[in-house]
Image (spheres, rainbow, N blue to C red):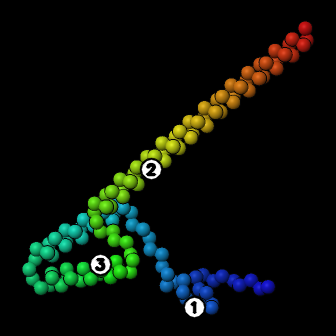
Amino acid sequence: RKLKKKSSGINAEYGDVQSLKKKKKRKNLEKLLEDAKKSKKELQTLKKATDEQSGNKLQDKAWKKAISMAKGEKQKDNPDLIVKSIKRKEGQKRKAKKEWNERVGGQKKAQKEKQKKRQANIEKRIEGKKKNKR
């Protein structure tokens, strides 16, 4: 059997397929929240305006949102939900930190107990040797 060499992102059989699938980086939630608030303010100003250009922008945004929803993309434009997810993430961090501290504390406690037991056994052994000498 011959082994095929993997080239950097190009598969000889299918062409340059892997470069078409670009991985999107996740924005951090604070940045998403800031962007969502900006877009919400912009939508409000567009709704208040009466000129045709702002109406067109509003319609374009609505179409883009509808198309992205039809594609199945997640909508990350609701500031309330983003704040909720930030709080949930912070809660998860606190919980993980607490569990980690408990685990470390348990390990230290177990280590001290083992050392204490070892010391007691050593002393017992020494006492036994002294008794046997007499």
Give the labeled residue for mark 1.
Answer: 15
Identify the residue at horizontal 78%, vertical 22% (top origin).
Answer: 122
Give the labeled residue for mark 3.
Answer: 65
Report how far apart the C-alphas of labels 1 and 2 lie in the structure.
43 Å
Amino acid carrying label 3: it is: Lys
Q: Position of residue 46 (x, y in %)?
A: 15, 76
Identify the residue at horizontal 54%, vertical 86% (top origin).
Answer: 17
Mark with earlier residue (1, 3): 1
Say whether residue 34 is visible.
no
Mark with earlier residue (1, 2): 1
Secondary structure of residue under mark 3:
helix
Q: Position of residue 19 (x, y in %)?
A: 52, 83
**Depth order, front residue of 72/77:** 72
Mark with earlier residue (2, 3): 3
Which image quadrant for residue 75? bottom left
Which image quadrant for residue 85? bottom left
* Numbered badge on residue 93: 2
User: Which quadrant: the N terminus?
Assistant: bottom right
Q: Is residue 99 left or right of residue 108?
A: left
